[in-house]
Amino acid sequence: MTAAAAPVAGIPRLNEITGLSTDYLNHFSEAIMVLEMISAAPECVEDFLAWEPRSYSEHFAASRFTDRHAAITAYRAADPLVRESLDTLADIMNTMLMATREAIAADPTAPKALALAKRAVTGLKPMVSRAAAVINGNEPLVCSARTAPQNAVDELFNR
């Protein structure tokens, strides 16, 4: 991996190798946390149903992150392969969360909805860890594939 083209030294929470921030992963971690809570607190379903996917840039544009503009600039200047790897993982996580959201929205009280929430959490947690490794420059790059998000959803639903 190459160093980010934009200077990131001295900008808190931006990895100096990749120019990316793990703060983006909070967007996914929050959805995962709500999914984990649904079985014990069914009223959390509404919080999960309100979740919307966001790209890296969209996340920071809407955040209170002090250096949000620097984070977006550094993302755009990051090594394209690193960015593509992160974007592929984010696309997979977004697709899985949206499919889970649609299934739960159809009948939030169904036992299948709770089982699906648990399966989604089981599949998403390792992806968040892998995305963190990409952001921190510790993960081999993910091959981009147009079918990767759909494959993840198919696996989630055992198709």
Image: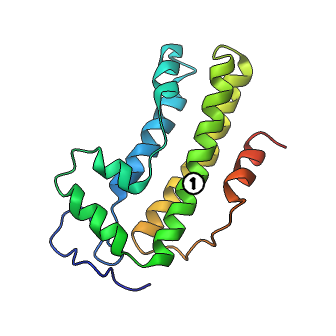
* Numbered disc 1: secondary structure: helix
Q: Position of residue 72 (x, y in %)?
A: 30, 62
Q: At which x and y percent is residue 34?
A: 48, 30
Q: Is residue 1 above or below residue 78?
A: below
Left or right: 12 with respect to 147? left
Q: Is residue 21 above or below residue 36?
A: below
Q: How is the image coloured?
A: rainbow
- Nearer-the-camera pick, 38 or 20: 20
* Left or right of 133 on screen, residue 61: left
Q: Residue furthest bottom?
A: 2
Q: Quadrant of the N terminus?
A: bottom left
Question: In x, y percent, where is residue 45?
Answer: 53, 20
Residue at left offset 50%, top offset 27% = 48
Residue at (50% x, 57% y) in the render? 129
Identity of the residue drawn at 77% across and 47% down: 155
Residue depicted at 63% across the width and 73% down the height: 143
Number of marks drawn? 1
Residue type, numbered disc 1: Asp
Q: Residue 8 occupies which quadrant of the picture? A: bottom left
Q: Tell me residue 117's x, y (percent).
A: 63, 31
Query: Where is the C terminus found, in terms of image quarters?
Result: top right
Instruction: Kindly identify which residue carries mark 1.
Output: 91
**10 Å crowding of disc 1: few (<14), some (14-19), many (20+):** some
